[in-house]
């Protein structure tokens, strides 16, 4: 397939691009810094400068595209959610998705599939209920953002594009994301759960998240939202207990929610609340998870990272 990727140099995008190449696809990455992208990505990748807020020659690449994977957007879990920061988080996602849809509308010459990023923040803060793709939207900034983001992407279905929305949970790997930030306190014997500890963590290994994106690309029967999470969510207490056990460290220094509120403002709420989400659509459509249980997943990630450091 001829595949366009936005956000192709990030925590998800970079290994995804490598996998797409290994599977024989032709990949074009749209980047605000094509030169920087070329330095990070393998040479078979075509890197093109784009500005989602302005028309340009970049849109011509959509003429031959079979698929678009839109991962573009400013990081959500970096820095305090000031008014300017939340505006950037919102605008970067909506503007890039709007640009992708308009480029498909104006230039695509064949039926395409658009796999667009989203998040389980769509469901808002929830209790112990299991949430599948049919669950109602919640409330709050992330729920509103995901609704607007998904609505922008779904407008591509009006002209025949198959649209898939990847509602993603906590993506686990050693070289980034939430796990990399959680590990250090444990290594210093200062790790523990973020209170209250009963909030649910819906997680997924990065390999499975990338696998699900590629599965959605080629599975014509999949459209609309799917939950990109592992089949077994856990509570924050359980997550940190397993993390400590794998690292041979105690999980005994709880992080009070009020401290996060002081340090991070509204951003802290995404760590003190959670959603118990299951990948109902992926399981029903036959996707096989490589990593479905937390303990062996963390064992694989963290022991693999330690071995890589020793080898270096």
Image (spheres, rainbow, N blue to C red):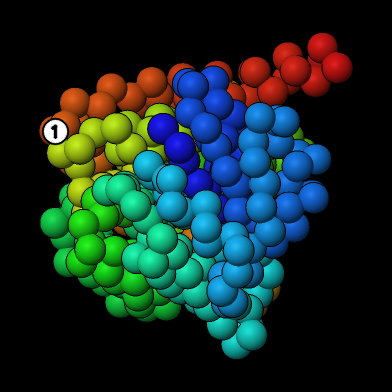
Would you say 145 lies left or right of 277 here? right
Image position, residue 242 (x, y; %): 49, 31
Element type where label 1 sits in the image: helix
Q: Tell me if I can see residue 194 in this picture.
A: no
Would you say 265 lies left or right of 63 here? right
Please state which of residues 301 and 44 is positioned toward the viewer in this rendering.
44
Q: Residue at x 34, y 71 (%)?
A: 152
Please state which of residues 190 and 157 is positioned toward the viewer in this rendering.
157
Seen in the picture, residue 308 relative to 238 is either above or below; the reply is: above
Q: Quadrant of the N terminus?
A: top left
Image position, residue 122 (x, y; %): 32, 65
Reading the image, the residue beneath label 1 is 284
Please state which of residues 146 and 105 is positioned toward the viewer in this rendering.
105
Q: In which image quadrant can residue 275 be found? A: bottom left
Structural crowding at the residue carrying mark 1, measured as other residues with C-alpha within 10 Å and reported as few (<14), some (14–19) or many (≥20)? few
Image position, residue 270 (x, y; %): 47, 64
Q: Residue furthest right?
A: 312
Q: In which image quadrant can residue 98 be found? A: bottom left
Q: Tell me if I can see residue 96 in this picture.
A: yes
Q: In which image quadrant can residue 210 be found? A: top left
Q: Quadrant of the C terminus?
A: top right
Q: Residue at x 52, y 61 (%)?
A: 59
Seen in the picture, residue 242 relative to 180 is either above or below; the reply is: above
């Amino acid at each position: 397939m001829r595949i366009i990727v936005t956000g192709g140099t990030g925590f998800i995008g970079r290994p995804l691009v490598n996998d797409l190449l290994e599977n024989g696809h032709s990949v074009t990455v749209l980047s605000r810094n094509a030169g920087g992208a070329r330095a990070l990505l393998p040479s078979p990748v075509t890197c093109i400068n784009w500005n989602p807020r302005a028309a340009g020659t970049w849109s011509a690449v959509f003429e031959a595209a079979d698929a678009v994977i839109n991962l573009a957007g400013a990081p959500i879990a970096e820095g305090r959610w000031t008014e300017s920061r939340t505006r950037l988080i919102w605008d970067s996602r909506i503007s890039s998705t709007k640009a992708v849809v308009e480029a498909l509308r104006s230039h695509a010459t064949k039926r395409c599939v658009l796999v667009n990023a989203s998040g389980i923040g769509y469901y808002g803060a929830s209790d112990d209920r299991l949430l599948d793709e049919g669950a109602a939207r919640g409330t709050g900034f992330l729920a509103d953002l995901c609704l607007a983001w998904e609505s922008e992407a779904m407008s591509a279905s009006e002209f025949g594009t198959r649209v898939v929305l990847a509602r993603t949970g906590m993506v686990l790997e050693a070289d980034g994301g939430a796990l990399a930030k959680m590990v250090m306190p444990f290594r210093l014997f200062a790790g523990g759960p973020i209170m209250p500890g009963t909030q649910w963590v819906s997680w997924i290994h990065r390999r499975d998240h990338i696998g699900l994106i590629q599965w959605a690309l080629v599975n014509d029967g999949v459209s609309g939202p799917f939950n990109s999470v592992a089949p077994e969510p856990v509570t924050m207490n359980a997550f940190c207990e397993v993390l400590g056990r794998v690292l041979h460290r105690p999980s005994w220094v709880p992080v009070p929610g009020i401290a996060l509120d002081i340090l991070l403002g509204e951003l802290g709420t995404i760590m003190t609340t959670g959603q118990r989400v299951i990948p109902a659509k992926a399981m029903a459509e036959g996707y096989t998870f490589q990593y479905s249980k937390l303990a062996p997943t963390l064992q694989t990630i963290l022991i693999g990272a330690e071995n890589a450091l020793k080898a270096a």
